[in-house]
Image: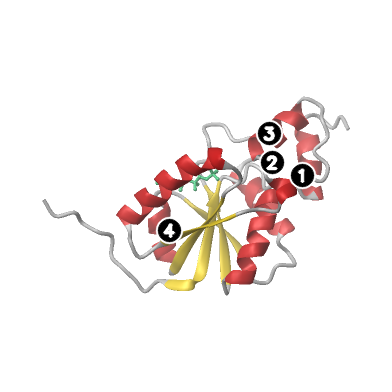
Amino acid sequence: MVTRKRPSGPYDARVAVYPGSFDPLTNGHLDIIQRSARMFDRVIVAVLVNASKEPLFSLDERVAMARDALRGEKRATVDTFDGLLVDYVGRAGAGVVVRGLRAVSDFEYEYQMALMNRRLNDQVETVFMMPAEQYVYISSRLVKEVCMLGGSVNGLVPDAVEQRLIRKRGGRR
Ligand code: PNS
């Protein structure tokens, strides 16, 4: 049986896609984007349309938070995608997928995903980047949980994201 590969090229290794649900964007995400922007000419932050069954933030909110946080970052743009990531990467003409690796616990899932994406399109490379140490324990899930239960997430997410999270929990500071 012949395995059909996705059409290849032209893929640009100077253009990277940083995909995710970003529900919401954290300072850990921001750190990875800033590091990527130093390595690549262009970084496309690609927000998944159908994030987990019930995202806390709508697609528009997730995009707005990312755009707001990246206003000063000339090499980064924000877009949305649906369907297979490698198809989006191909449409965007990018050659690289950037993923953040925080701990060993991330590794298995990320490794599976990278190899599956390579199987689907071997023109696209996945590059793993480590965030600064102070962000290695942060995740969108934990940030949402802590904030909704009344804890402070100050310093873990951009200020505008913190304000939106506080509004979601009913304004209680
Ligand atoms: O950081 P997240 O929210 O866990 O991101 C996961 C994401 C969006 C990168 C992943 O779910 C994805 O790529 N979804 C698109 C569908 C797809 O291509 N699935 C096959 C990946 S092997």
Res 138 label: 2
Tell me where residue 25 appears, x and y as whole percent.
Answer: 67, 48
Residues packed near mark 4 inside 10 Å, few (<14), some (14 to 19) or many (20 plus): some
Q: Nearer the viewer, residue 65 or 114?
A: 114
Q: Earlier in the sequence, mark 1 or mark 4?
A: 4
Which residue is the site of mark 4? 88
Q: Are marks 3 and 4 in contact (CB under 8 Å)?
A: no
Q: Quadrant of the C terminus?
A: top right
Tell me where residue 7 appears, x and y as whole percent.
Answer: 28, 65
Residues packed near mark 3 inside 10 Å, few (<14), some (14 to 19) or many (20 plus): few
Q: Nearer the viewer, mark 3 or mark 4?
A: 3
Assign a secondary structure to mark 3: helix
Q: Amino acid at mark 3?
A: Leu
Alpha carbon separation for disc pair 3 and 4: 28 Å
Tell me where residue 156 appears, x and y as whole percent.
Answer: 77, 44
Which residue is the site of mark 3? 142
Alpha carbon separation for disc pair 2 and 1: 7 Å
The colour scheme of the drawn protein is secondary structure
Q: Earlier in the sequence, mark 3 or mark 1?
A: 3
Q: Is mark 4 within 8 Å of ligand 1?
A: yes
Which residue is the site of mark 1? 156
Q: Are marks 3 and 2 in contact (CB under 8 Å)?
A: yes
Q: Residue at x 35, y 48 (%)?
A: 116
Q: Amino acid at mark 4?
A: Tyr
Outermost residue toward the left?
1
